[in-house]
Image (spheres, rainbow, N blue to C red):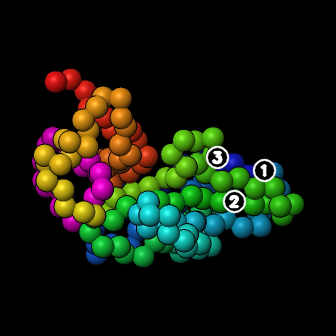
Amino acid sequence: PPFVDRIGRWPQEPTAADETWITARVRAERPLASVRLAYRIDESGADESVVEMADDGAHRDGVAGDGVWGAAVPAQAHNTIVLFRVVAEDETGAGVTTPLETDPTGFHGFYVNDNQPESPLPVYTLLWNHRTAIAPRTMRSRLASCAVYVNAAFAYRGDLYFNIGLRRRGG
């Protein structure tokens, strides 16, 4: 089957005004039949959109025929999580999806954020029920026990770390 690595994104930290380009290097012993980008918006379980990736030099993929494939995700609203996978198949039908099925996150991802402060310090964004305004006391009560994990994500420099467990520790 094909081998997919070097997943890239441009711009690195997308805003609502940016179309976001995803690239991946794909290698195979046999000619490739297709390379596709499957993405969905937020973790809501919405249907995936699938677009063909191209290695033609016109999809922010470098030089045509160099093994780097690219496709665009349309601009998304501020505070949007975008989850995606790259699917490659060769002419025999052998295929691979990245991340692999054994990866607990199940997706690569990025976070669209218009609030990007200029700071020499790293800025992390914790995303927990991020579409609904929640008072801090309510958040604390949901984390009442250190034995209970709440599903969350966090973003750093546009990269999304999806499907992490968040729990209360300490007093």
The residue pinned by badge 2 equals 88
Q: CA distance from mark 1 to mark 3?
A: 15 Å
The numbered disc on residue 1 is: 1
* Amino acid type of the residue that numbered disc 3 sits on in the rendered structure: Glu
Tell me residue 164's x, y (percent).
40, 41
Q: Tell me the residue at 38%/46% (across/down).
A: 151
Element under disc 3: loop
First to last magenta residue range: 113-130
Q: Which residue is mark 3?
A: 101
Residue 15 spot, x, y in % from top left: 28, 67
| Residue 61 percent coordinates (x, y) | 53, 64
Q: Position of residue 22 (x, y in %)?
A: 49, 63
Q: Front-most of 83 and 27?
A: 83
Which corner quadrant holds the C terminus?
top left
Question: Which amino acid, mark 2?
Answer: Ala
Name which residue lies at 69% across and 48% down: 3
- Crowding around mark 2 (Cα neighbors within 10 Å: few <14, some 14 to 19, many 20+) is many
Mark 2 touches mark 3? (CB < 8 Å):
no
Looking at the picture, tell me which residue is in the foreground, 142 or 91.
Answer: 142
Q: Is residue 22 visible?
A: no
Predominant SS of the magenta segment: loop
Q: Could you tell me which residue is drawn at 35 percent across and 73 percent down?
A: 76
- Answer with left or right where residue 164 lies relative to residue 58: left
Q: Amino acid at mark 1?
A: Pro
Q: Nearer the viewer, mark 1 or mark 3?
A: 3
Say which label, 1 or 3, has the lower sequence index: 1
Question: Do callouts 1 and 2 mark residues in contact (Cβ within 8 Å)?
Answer: yes
Secondary element at image label 2: strand
Question: In the picture, residue 132 is in which quadrant?
Answer: bottom left
Judge whether 92 appears above or below 124 on screen.
below
Q: Secondary structure at mark 1?
A: loop
